[in-house]
Each structure stands twice: as C-alpha cells, then as structure tokens.
Image: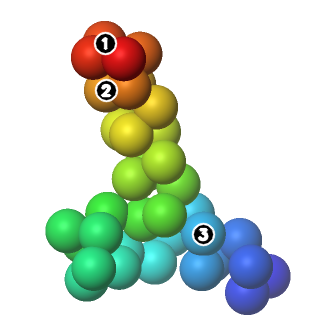
Amino acid sequence: DYVNWYNNIRPHGALNYLTPKEYKENFYKNCLIFC
C-alpha cells in the first residue's frame, strides 16, 4: 500500500530524514512539553 509506505516507512529529506509519522509524533510530544 503506497499511502502506508509514504507516511510510515519512507524517510523524507525535508523532515530531517524522519518519516512523516515520526515527525508528527515528535512534534506533538515536544508541543506538550513546551506549549
């Protein structure tokens, strides 16, 4: 499934080579700490 691969497996250069899922998880984890 392409959407699963794109969002959960494929590292993205613009996201510091994190997957979109990892980037989103890190963003919300840090937001809870600093917001």
Answer whether labels 1 and 3 touch (C-beta < 8 Å). no
Q: Position of residue 31 (x, y in %)?
A: 38, 26
> Which corner quadrant of the image does residue 34 belong to?
top left
Q: Which residue is mark 1?
A: 33
Q: Earlier in the sequence, mark 1 or mark 3?
A: 3
Separation of residues labelled 1 and 3 (CA atoms): 24 Å
How is the rendered protein coloured? rainbow
Q: Position of residue 7 (x, y in %)?
A: 60, 69
SS class, disc 3:
helix
Q: Is residue 14 above or below residue 18?
A: below
User: Quarter holding the N terminus?
Assistant: bottom right
User: Quarter holding the C terminus?
Assistant: top left
Question: Mark 1 or mark 3: which is in front?
Answer: 1
Q: Which residue is mark 2?
A: 30
Left or right of 7? Residue 19 is left
Q: Position of residue 24 (x, y in %)?
A: 48, 48
Answer whether labels 1 and 2 touch (C-beta < 8 Å). yes
Q: Among all residues in the image, which is located at the extreme top?
A: 33
Q: Residue at x 73, y 87 (%)?
A: 2
Question: Which mark, by number, is residue 7?
Answer: 3
The three-letter amino acid code for the residue at tag 1 is Ile
Separation of residues labelled 1 and 2 (CA atoms): 5 Å
Q: Is residue 15 above or below residue 35?
A: below
Question: Which mark, by number, is residue 24?
Answer: none
Left or right of 6? Residue 26 is left
Question: Mark 3 or mark 2: which is in front?
Answer: 2
Separation of residues labelled 3 and 2 (CA atoms): 20 Å
SS class, disc 2:
helix
Q: Position of residue 8 (x, y in %)?
A: 57, 63
SS class, disc 1:
helix
Query: Across the whole image, how many numbered discs are drawn on residues?
Result: 3
Answer whether labels 3 and 2 touch (C-beta < 8 Å). no
